[in-house]
Amino acid sequence: MAPVLFLFVMLTYLPWISFLGFDLEMENHFVVRALDRVLSVAEVDAAPFIARSVNVMARLLTETYAKPANPLFGHHLWESIAALIKISFDSQADKASVLDSYEGALFPLFEKILTEPQADAYAPFVFQVMAQLIELRGSAKMPAGKVASLKERAGTMKGSYRSLLRKLTEPLYYESQGNIPALTRLLQAYIEHDPAFVAEGDNLMRTLGVFQKLVSSKVNDWLGFYILQSLTLALPVNALDQHFKTIITVIFTRLQSSKTMQLIKSFLIYISYFAVAHGPMAILQRIEGVQNGYTSVKVFFSLTFLFTCFLLVLLAW
């Protein structure tokens, strides 16, 4: 009862500057950290007070996004927003309406944050919350405790997100290391929840451009493979055929020039995903279509392929 009562007080008075004598402009992170902790404890017990939280959080973001001064304040504020979204989603029967209300309150702020350079410190949080909203909508019609399959998720993303895909694939966003994990999760959400749109026009080329940029980096190559795995599982097997030669060339070039255990592991997992989704011969035939010049890498791939088949046999057994 105490956490719920404290939550009610905080959601009622947090928007006002005089709350507990703290000036909102100070971005006192102790206050929002307390809210974050209370939400993590109260969970669904906080549901009766959640309705007022949407406008409260939107107001706090409006007041602070232009000049974020305290990183801890921003971190706990966004953690609280993510927790409120999850609690609201879990506690309400009309889950689609819950997501609509949060998207209506937050989406204008998302667009402002992503277009104003001084607010770029909040960009990674925007990407994470957007991914959360897309993922939750994909499971909104599923019974409690059941995870939606890729087929059930496809087509569940709202059209309002589509206009942002071009911006999300711009190279500039990937210059900041802090953006990359969140952007990877968001692109995976796009691919898995609206694969038809990702495959349209130049959207697929731009998404593969992100994959190529990440795989070229020793720090982020594993995240590039996450994107490639989502594309392989969500799209029809022939959707990537015209790009497959380029994809494999990028991977083989990296394996020849600067092979690491992380890269080998990611490549092995990708081959396994492809073999499970489309059959072992499908990946083998496509690899064979790559031009000569990668003999040593092909030997490595052949051994990897045999090892993957061995694992599949063990799993089937």
Image: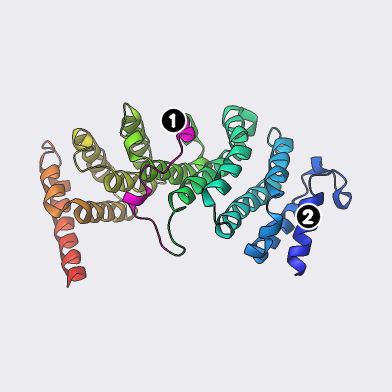
The disc, 2 or 1, on the residue closer to the chain's N-terminal end is 2
Inspect the image, locate mark 1, and give the three-letter code of the amino acid beneath it: Pro
Secondary element type, mark 1: helix
Quarter in which the C terminus is drawn: bottom left
Depth check: give the residue in front, 193 or 70.
193
Name above or below for residue 306 compared with residue 225. below
Q: Give the residue at x 31% y 26%.
A: 201
Give yes or no for residue 150 being in the magenta stretch.
Answer: yes
| Residue 203 x/y as whole percent | 35, 30
User: Which quarter of the rendered picture does the N terminus lie within?
Assistant: bottom right
Question: Where does residue 69 sit, x and y in percent of width and height?
Answer: 72, 40
Residue 305, percent from left and from top: 16, 56
The residue wearing badge 2 is 10
Q: Quadrant of residue 273?
A: bottom left
Specify the segment rendered in magenta.
Answer: 146-164
Nearest the viewer among 194 and 128 is 194
